[in-house]
Image: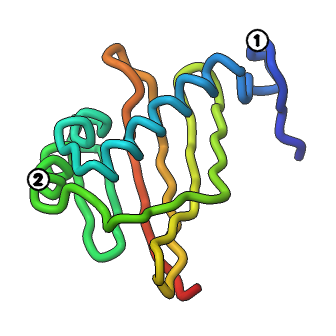
Amino acid sequence: MSVPTGVGPATSAGPTVDRPDVLAEVTAAFDRYEVALRAGDVTTLVELFWDDPRCVRYGVADRQYGGDAVATWRRGDPGVPPGRTLSGTVVVTVDDRTAVVSTLFSYPGATVEGRQTQTWVRFADGWRIVAAHVSEVPA
């Protein structure tokens, strides 16, 4: 089965994938998240997660179910070590309201490769992460 790609209206063949305007919006939201993560900006980090009990975040050694749990966890562990770098970032928009961002991350001197996936949905108040998964494997 082939996956429909390209720019244009959704058809019976499937959703519109990777519209440039939607890609730009999601990329900007993801970049905003990364800046906040590196700066320990808890307010922005909490804002960018969906404030709903169905929101899920699986971390390297933790997990949260619901926006309140994510906010509580963030207040206790707001940032990341200095020198975080990203590579292999892939942004896929499925339509004008749904996207997935996958990236690899590393830290200077680290012996692990970090992996991060976020599912973003556009709500009335903007793009929000509805599910996130962070893991690390030996490099």
Confirm or deny contact between disc 1 and disc 2 (CB under 8 A): no
Mark found first going from the N terminus, 1 or 2? 1
Crowd rating for badge 2 (residues with CA inside 10 Å; few <14, some 14–19, many 20+)? some
The colour scheme used to paint the residues is rainbow
Disc 1 secondary structure class: loop
Q: Which residue is mark 2?
A: 75
Q: Amino acid at mark 2?
A: Arg
Residue 1 to residue 98: above or below: below
Measuring from the top left, give residue 106's x and y in whole percent. Answer: 50, 70
Q: Amino acid at mark 1?
A: Pro
Disc 2 secondary structure class: helix
Residue 74 relative to residue 116: left or right: left
- Distance between the alpha carbons at the discs numbered 1 and 2: 41 Å
Which residue is at 72% across, 28% downward? 18
Question: Taking the image as drawn, is residue 15 in sight?
Answer: no
Measuring from the top left, give residue 5's x and y in whole percent. Answer: 83, 31
Question: Taking the image as drawn, is residue 91 in sight?
Answer: yes
- Could you say which is closer to the camera, residue 2 or residue 100? 100
Query: Farthest right residue?
Result: 2
Which residue is at 55% across, 58% downward? 86
Query: Count of labels shown?
Result: 2
Q: Quadrant of residue 62?
A: bottom left
Q: Which residue is mark 1?
A: 9
Residue 124 relative to residue 115: left or right: left
Q: Quadrant of residue 19?
A: top right
Q: Quadrant of residue 17?
A: top right
Which residue is at 37% across, 32% downward? 128
